[in-house]
Amino acid sequence: MRYEIVDTAKIKTVEEVENRIYHAFKVTRTLPDPWPGKYVCPLGRWSPTEYPADEVDPKPVRERYVSRDYRLADEVSEWWPKLPLDFEARSLILYRCGAPVTIDGKTLNWSGVRRWKDVAYSFHCHRNTAKNRWNNAMKEIFAYVQSLNCA
């Protein structure tokens, strides 16, 4: 499913806020770690005979992001500390979007968007309850974004 990401000033619906949240976490997930890892020389693993010129690379190419995507994700990161959400709602959003979060003493790292079944299991509730909490949080974020647009 392809959706359009709109600027903050053009957000008119809760669905656009939801798309913006998903997009921000998707872009942030692709950023490199803030600390340097172990140094590995890329030339040591590369061989010119490994990939013949006439064959297509079977691995899918990662989605590429442009500066607008990073700017929009940075705007969401600026909203995050100011949002009028409780701890449970923030944890639910982080968990659903696949961001690092600690639940029941377990620290989870980056992943893709998690299924509602997994969200409900981790938060000890029914799937409909988890979706309702998500929708209520998105409505609160929408109200916050509307207050930004009015100012």
Image (spheres, helix red, strand yellow):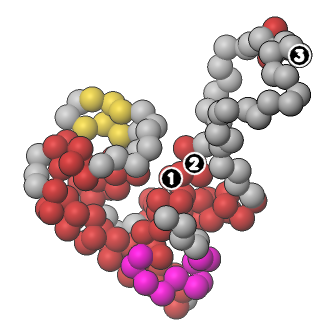
Mark 3 or mark 2, earlier in chain: 2
From the top left corner, tell me how far across and down residue 94 is, in percent.
Answer: 37, 50
**CB atoms at circles 2 and 1 under 8 Å apart?**
yes
Name the quarter where the C terminus is drawn.
bottom right
- Give the Cα separation between the discs numbered 3 and 2: 33 Å
Residue 8 falls in image quadrant: bottom right
Which residue is the site of mark 3?
48
Q: Secondary structure at mark 3?
A: loop
Q: Residue at x 33, y 75 (%)?
A: 140
Q: Disc 1 residue type?
A: Phe
Q: Residue at x 27, y 70 (%)?
A: 135
User: 18 or 83, which is in the foreground?
Assistant: 18
Residue 14 inside the magenta-drawn segment: yes
Which residue is the site of mark 1?
25
Which residue is the site of mark 2?
28
Q: Secondary structure at mark 2?
A: helix
Q: Among all residues in the image, which is located at the extreme left?
A: 125
From the top left corner, tell me how far across and down residue 27 is, in percent.
Answer: 59, 52
User: Magenta part of the protein: which range?
Assistant: 6-15
Residue 55 inside the magenta-drawn segment: no
Q: Against 44, is 135 above or below?
A: below
Residue 30 falls in image quadrant: top right
Residue 22 visible to the viewer: yes
Q: Against 41, is 134 above or below?
A: below
